[in-house]
Image (tube, coloured by chain):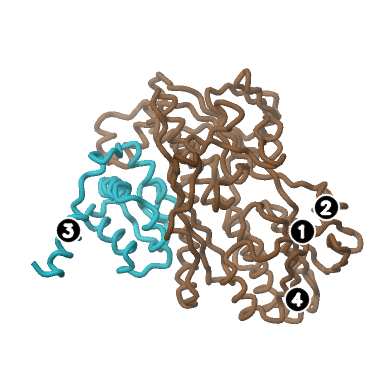
Chain colours: A cyan, B brown
Amino acid sequence: MNNKLTASIAALACVMSTPAAAQGIDANQARYIAANCANCHGTTGKSSGAMPSLSGQSKVYLLEQMRAFRDGKRTATIMHQIAKGYTDAQIDAVAEHFSRQPK
Amino acid sequence: MNRQQFSRRDLLKLGAAGAAVSSLAACATMGGSKGKVVVIGGGYGGATAAKYTRLWSDGGIDVTMVEPEAAFVSCPLSNLVLGGSKTLADLTVPYTGLAKYGVRVVRDTATAVDTAKKQVRLASGATLDYDRLVVSPGVDFLWDNVRGMSAAAAEQIPHAWKAGPQTVLLRRQLEAMADGGVVVMSHPLAPYRCPPGPYERACQIAFYLKSRKPKSKLIMLDANPDYVSKKPLFSRVFAEDYKGIVEYRVNSAVSEVDVAGKTLVLELGDRIKGDVLNLIPPQRAANIARDAGLITANNRWCEVNWTTMESIKVPGVHVLGDATLSAPAMPKSGHMANQHGKAAAAAIVELLNGRTPMPPTMANTCYSFIDDRNAVHVASVHRWVPEKKTLEGVAGSVGISSQDRPSWALEGQYALGWAQTIWADMLA
């Protein structure tokens, strides 16, 4: 197996990581961590400004973006910092939470 | 349509978002309250705690918020009123939006807390009983630390460090000043409310002078030995954008004010005269926090248990925002106070339901406008460290804007969007 393929499989495995609930983050904790994001992205994930809305986005897309910010693959003014502040389990829980909010 | 007239069909028609709010209202009328929460202060911390306690308890906890002002006026962005690109009206949001979450807003001033009886006394004479109290009072000034300074003197030498009439007063003084005049501003040793705020203010005043009164200058007297926040950004802006306008001096604590002579006197005796003076006095947790016995650190700040935001001294009382003794690298900011409000709300909901509060995680973002459209940020994420019993900034998350100037225009857009979104997160 070549390195590129290995990396792709690893990335896929990250994206499809274990649901947050299995990692000890319940729904109450998920909505609390998601409220960290609400200052800029809105209480239910709908922003009132130029920041993207998160509500109703697919979980896979949200996870991909957070990882891209964290790993420097998507440029940002601020999200490259914020994305480094949360554990994988927290990011998973937040992505799950916003994916279930009405668009 | 009032609440009693809701039919099942109406609820279905409203859709998920509407139904969430409606079910809150319905719960409130069904009784079975899990407890009473009183929130003192309707700022970034208090209003957020009030809304989220209702939201996260599914309306099961009664929440009363006590706030003397008719509407919220934001301190963040208020420096732009001085620069001239915003008015106070742009920063004002009514409290009426909290009604749809079932928050009862009482326009009054909390004058005393009886922590034994669990009761808040109001200026009107009324009392409010609580199971849990949230105190988010902001700061009051240590007038005695600067000779000659007082609340009365601030009518001539504004602090403009609480957004409102003081902001307008300072703006009017700047407008009335002749071209060629000297503005002198002073801010105290850290910690104080809004670490980057004084430097943003210097930028805003300089922006106004540069565009409208180019022969004028600003002397910035910083009591600290160096920039408290965003040094690489503000020092560059002072040097590039406001060269010849801003004169920045460190180690310049003001110990005395000559109000009639329009002069600030430094600790070492230097006398600095100006046409417009802006003195930001040293601060502490506001009076109601002191009177309730919540101040525990240096006679100034309230220490809290960060897992619940509960006072280390007075059980059942949660303290938020600028009034707290900050955790390491945690700024006294509106954004942070909002995050304190959510941490307190989450903890209160868990506690009143007989569950254990979860460990807190909080984020901060502070934008500073360097002119009318470009902004720079400092941001961080703070994680609970159990062995140290505090929150610490997570490596890699703590940092400031890049030096790439074109990105500052985009950050200006985000900064305005931040304001609209956080105000809605608190109040709508």
Cα–Cα span, label 4 and label 1: 16 Å
Whole-Å distance between the Cαs marked 3 and 4? 58 Å
Q: Residues within 10 Å of mark 2 (few under 14, many from 20)?
A: many
Amino acid on which disc 2 is placed: Val
Look at the numbered discs 1 and 2 and tell me whether their residues touch, using CB distance below 8 Å: yes
Chain for disc number 4: B
What residue lies at 63% left-to-right and 40% top-to-bottom?
B137
Badge 4 is on which residue?
B217
**Can residue B327 be seen in this snapshot?**
yes
Q: Earlier in the sequence, mark 4 or mark 1?
A: 4
Q: Can residue B65 be seen in this view?
A: no
Check chain identity for marks 3 and 1: say if they share one: no
Labels 3, 2: front one: 3
For disc 2, the marked residue is B146
Subunit of label 1: B
Tell which tag, 3 or 4, sits nearer the viewer.
3
Q: Name the residue under label 3.
A: A12
Q: How crowded is mark 1: few (under 14 residues within 10 Å), some or many (20 or more)?
A: many
The percent position of residue B6, horizontal first and vertical second, equals: 32, 30
- What amino acid is labelled 4 in the image? Lys
In the foreground, B351 or B5: B351
